[in-house]
Amino acid sequence: MNEIVNAINGVIWSPALIYLCLGVGLYFSLRSRFLQLRHIKEMIRLMFDGKSTDAGVSSFQALAMTLAGRVGTGNIAGVATAITFGGPGAMFWMWMVAFLGSSSAFVESTLGQVYKEKINGEYRGGPAFYIEKGLGMKWYAWTFAIATIFACGVLLPGVQANSIGASLQTAFDIDPNVTAAGLALLLGFIIFGGVKRIANFASTVVPFMALGYIIVACVIIALNIHALPGVILLIWKSAFGFDAGFGAILGLAIMWGVKRGVYSNEAGQGTGPHASSAAAVSHPAKQGLVQAFSVYIDTLFVCSATGFMLLITGLYNVQGPDGAALYTGIAGVAAGPGYVQTAMESMMPGFGSMFVAIALFFFAFTTIVAYYYIAETNIAYINRKVNRPWLTFVLKLTLMASTVYGTVKTAELAWGMGDIGVGLMAWLNIIAILLLQKTAFACLRDYEAQQAKGLDPVFHPEKLGIKNADYWAGHRSEDNLEQEKSGHPFEPDQDRKIS
């Protein structure tokens, strides 16, 4: 099975996908005049703007749902794996993917908002929706939907579950079979509760777990601050092949940095638009900017905290393409959460390993929940045409079974299957957003123009020549809906000043 999975990954994760991820991010950054820098202040403001409604969630809840999918085992085990097979330089390429990918995240999440629909009283959207409505290619939309259901419902949960099982066994000596049973029960309680329960769970847990992990990692970095300049220099030299010890694996540094960067922050992969489409906002660009900032939170904050901690303590391994050891700082420990647990335990004896296990549990479990929401959204897309309500029930059982299976299987197989899922979605979505970029950037220009006039931007698709944005044609904004409820409907053409 490992050989089959590795062979498939060799095709999907060819250099073409690596260059595509970097190239598209660079192109979008240039075309938007680096919106990820120009609009940082606005991104932060919008995170806490807006409220949830009966049909949608708030901007912050949508951000938390997205981060639930992005901040996962990739931020801990994924960073360790990238350093093992790509050397310290892989960290630099993870940063590059995050910086450039922020613009890709804006494009895909804005498109998700433009073409979202209201299904069974809830907002739904994502690549399948904007591929069908924006490109008019139903076969392509169905291909993405089926690939995503398979990836998020079958392939990806095992990666997260495997890391949970491994870390709990290391820290507390809990049998993986027991962990698998516990995860299945807890997962069932959350996913059978609907979108609102998922959003409430994510918005409560994600900020707490991410902030706690970053604080502890920063404490360790601060205690070894004298070593930080040397670590940053090592990352820089290794990223461009200038380091004598790791110069031979420059190509692997780029490949693993991009590979794990995409897995971690998911920019361009197509997962982010599902949660961002559920947000109740008055203009698609609002949630696009919020999602662009989520990439920074994931990679530049959480992943960097992990990488600095490993490199400062020296508790990591690096191996060459032939498997030969280029650096051994933690003999006998497989690449994954064990690196981070050992590093933190060395600095905080009796606490470090347990803390990482607990943090990883929350990181990975919320990611599994996010995978369910993404897969369910694509089933909702399919059910618009075939109306098979039982598909959602089957998805729930399949996801729980995949979680149990991944918990007790080997890490190599779990990561390999997860990479297949990520790669398939990335190929399909990046091509789609390249073809639809004109719509996303029209939304950005419209948002900036309205904001320059002192208005709180409201989306009018017909004024921008955007077709098939059916939801927005009758619902200019959530403010409109709220005012209609109060008996004072909002007039589409009246100007609204920012309060």
Image: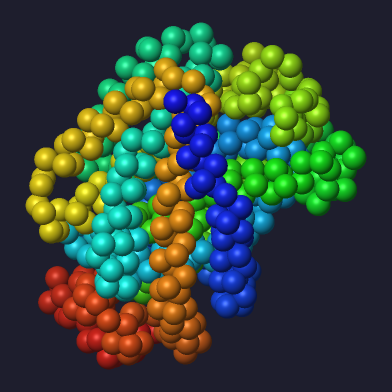
Image spot of residue 157 (x, y percent): 39, 34
Q: Is residue 71 visible?
A: no
In which quadrant will I find the N terminus?
top left
Q: On screen, 444 above or below 191?
A: below
Is 458 left or right of 6, judged from the image as shown?
A: left
Rendered residue at 40%/25% (across/down): 406
Q: Choose between 49 and 36: the one closer to the eye.
A: 36
Rendered residue at 58%/56% (across/down): 16
Q: Choose between 124 and 42: the one closer to the eye.
A: 124
Is 401 left or right of 315, judged from the image as shown?
A: left
Q: On screen, 444 above or below 6?
A: below
Q: Quadrant of residue 248?
A: top right
Image spot of residue 387 (x, y percent): 9, 52
Q: Choose between 438 and 286: the one closer to the eye.
A: 438
Rendered residue at 51%/24% (across/down): 411
Rendered residue at 12%/77% (across/down): 487
Q: On screen, 374 above or below 172?
A: below
Residue projecting furthest to the right: 244
Q: How is the image coloured?
A: rainbow
In which quadrant will I find the C terminus?
bottom left
Q: On screen, 73 above or below 271?
A: above
Q: Choose between 91 and 241: the one closer to the eye.
A: 241
Q: Quadrant of residue 246?
A: top right
Image spot of residue 203 (x, y percent): 39, 45
Is 424 left or right of 121, judged from the image as shown?
A: right
Q: Is residue 477 visible?
A: yes
